[in-house]
Amino acid sequence: QVKLVESGGGLVHTGGSLRLSCAASGDTDCISTMGWYRQAPGTERVLVAGITKGGSTNYADSVKGRFTISRDTAKNTLYLQMTSLNAADTAVYYCNAEYYCFRSSGDYTGRDWGQGTQVTVSS
């Protein structure tokens, strides 16, 4: 019920910066939590940063102090500002949204993912 489209990935040198965007559409009014995950080749998808509807954020230890997650509710867009990038940050980054929708037709919950955007940090 929520469509997520990531953008902003690309190739950057070590120490560089990138800003990822995630445009949400659909039942955006009932999104409770959004987050950025990443998956490097041969590894499991892991949480990079998350943000709740109330504005609370959390980060993986590996990105604390370097990445900043934010959201623009009016624009239905989630962002991940990444700085001081290094080779370990190379991965496909995915946007995620959890939602709890209360409708007259019936309540429902869900968790959706974007298609992913590649971030490659060259040495």
Image (cartoon, rainbow, N blue to C red):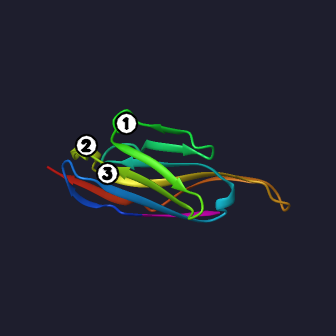
Q: Please, what secondary structure does the residue beneath circle 2 have?
A: helix
Q: Name the kind of residue labelled 1 in the image.
A: Lys
Indicate yes or no whether the magenta region holds residue 73: no
In the rendered image, which residue does mark 3 sit on? 91
How crowded pointer 1 is (Cα within 10 Å; few <14, some 14-19, many 20+) is rated as few
Expressed as whole percent of the image width and height from the top left, the position of residue 20 reads: 39, 58
Q: Nearer the viewer, mark 1 or mark 2?
A: 1
Q: Is residue 36 left or right of residue 91?
A: right
Q: Please, what secondary structure does the residue beneath circle 3 have?
A: strand
In the rendered image, which residue does mark 1 sit on? 64
Indicate yes or no whether the magenta region holds residue 5: yes
Q: Is residue 39 left or right of residue 72?
A: left
Q: Nearer the viewer, residue 41 or 83?
A: 83
Q: Nearer the viewer, mark 3 or mark 1?
A: 1
- Identify the mark at residue 88; answer none if there is no mark: 2
Q: Name the kind of residue labelled 2 in the image.
A: Ala
* Cα–Cα gap, marks 3 and 1: 17 Å
The numbered mark, 1 or 2, whose residue comes first in the sequence reads 1
The numbered mark, 3 or 1, whose residue comes first in the sequence reads 1
Image point 56% across, 39% down: which residue?
Answer: 56
Expressed as whole percent of the image width and height from the top left, the position of residue 118 reads: 32, 59
Q: Please, what secondary structure does the residue beneath circle 1 have?
A: loop
Image point 41% across, 52% down: which residue?
Answer: 80
User: Pointer 1 and pointer 2: residues touching (CB < 8 Å)?
Assistant: no
Expressed as whole percent of the image width and height from the top left, the position of residue 13 reads: 18, 54
Residue most extreme to the right: 104
Image point 56% across, 65% down: which residue?
Answer: 75
Expressed as whole percent of the image width and height from the top left, the position of residue 51 reads: 54, 44
Q: Name the kind of residue labelled 3 in the image.
A: Ala
Which residues lie in the magenta part? 1-6
Location of the N terminus (image quadrant): bottom right
Q: Is residue 48 above or below residue 8?
A: above
